[in-house]
Amino acid sequence: MHTPLNEVEVRVLGALIEKDITTPDYYPLSLNALVNACNQKNNREPVTALDEETVRQALTSLQEKRLAGPASGADSRVTKFEHRTQEVFNFTRGEIAVLCVLLLRGPQTPGELRGRTERMYHFETLDDVQSTLQRLMQREPALAKMLSRQPGTKESRYVHLLAGDVDDPYAGMASAHVARPAANPALSSADADRLTRLEEEIAALKEQFAQFRKQFE
């Protein structure tokens, strides 16, 4: 396993992956373009204000970890940079799209991931997202992890592990949330699962509509 990434390395790697998939005509990225990609205000959580030197240092360390570096064979007098995650991990298209969103936006529910990966990869169903997350979690070492549900929420969130293991602040409350559906005797576990999936589908549709609307703003 590579040395865990720091926050800047996570943002730089995520930005490179995103631009590779969504704007291939402008990829690889110059240092200036990469800084702008890291600091853009949409599809980022949190929004950052990184400078060129900070991004350059992150690129150097990512190159040492074989995850990114100068693009080979680029016909330009300006050095351009690319990610190399495919060479290291051999991801499927769905896996790299999910990982990219987790890198750029932090912990996400399956519904949020389905909506926010739409420009990179189209998941037909939430089950497809769940299957992709399971594959990332079953890697050796694991590249993703499921967090316990937060109080008042119905969906679990998932997080990437490229920056190392993540503390689960609600782990001790998991049993209470698992037992909660049984409090309503009219709602079977199967019904509760269907209700949760419906809510996730609605969340995904809302996210897709929000992304569509941004194109016209």
Image: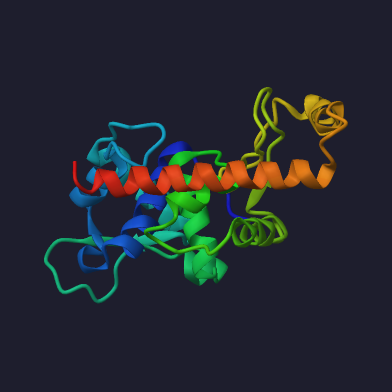
Colour approach in the figure: rainbow
For the point 81% across and 28% down, which residue is it? 180
In this view, the residue in front, 195 or 144, is 195
The picture places residue 194, in percent across and down from the top left corner, at 71, 47
For the point 31% across and 61% down, which residue is it? 22
The picture places residue 129, in percent across and down from the top left corner, at 59, 57
The picture places residue 155, in percent across and down from the top left corner, at 65, 38
Relative horizontal placement of residue 165, taking residue 162 as reference (left or right): right
For the point 37% across and 59% down, which residue is it? 119
Q: Is residue 1 above or below residue 5?
A: below
Image quadrant in which the C terminus is located: top left
Q: In the rendered picture of this protein, how many numbered marks are placed on residues?
A: 0
- Is residue 5 something one can see in this rendering? no
Residue 53 image-quadrant placement: top left
Residue 146 image-quadrant placement: top right
Residue furthest to the left in view is 77
Relative horizontal placement of residue 78, taking residue 149 as reference (left or right): left
- Is residue 32 something one can see in this rendering? yes
In this view, the residue in front, 163 or 174, is 174
Residue 8 image-quadrant placement: top left
Image quadrant in which the N terminus is located: bottom right
Q: Is residue 97 above or below residue 106?
A: below
The picture places residue 4, in percent across and down from the top left corner, at 57, 45
In this view, the residue in front, 150 or 33, is 150
Relative horizontal placement of residue 104, taking residue 31 as reference (left or right): right
Residue furthest to the front in view is 186
Relative horizontal placement of residue 135, taking residue 121 as reference (left or right): right
Q: Is residue 214 above or below residue 170?
A: below
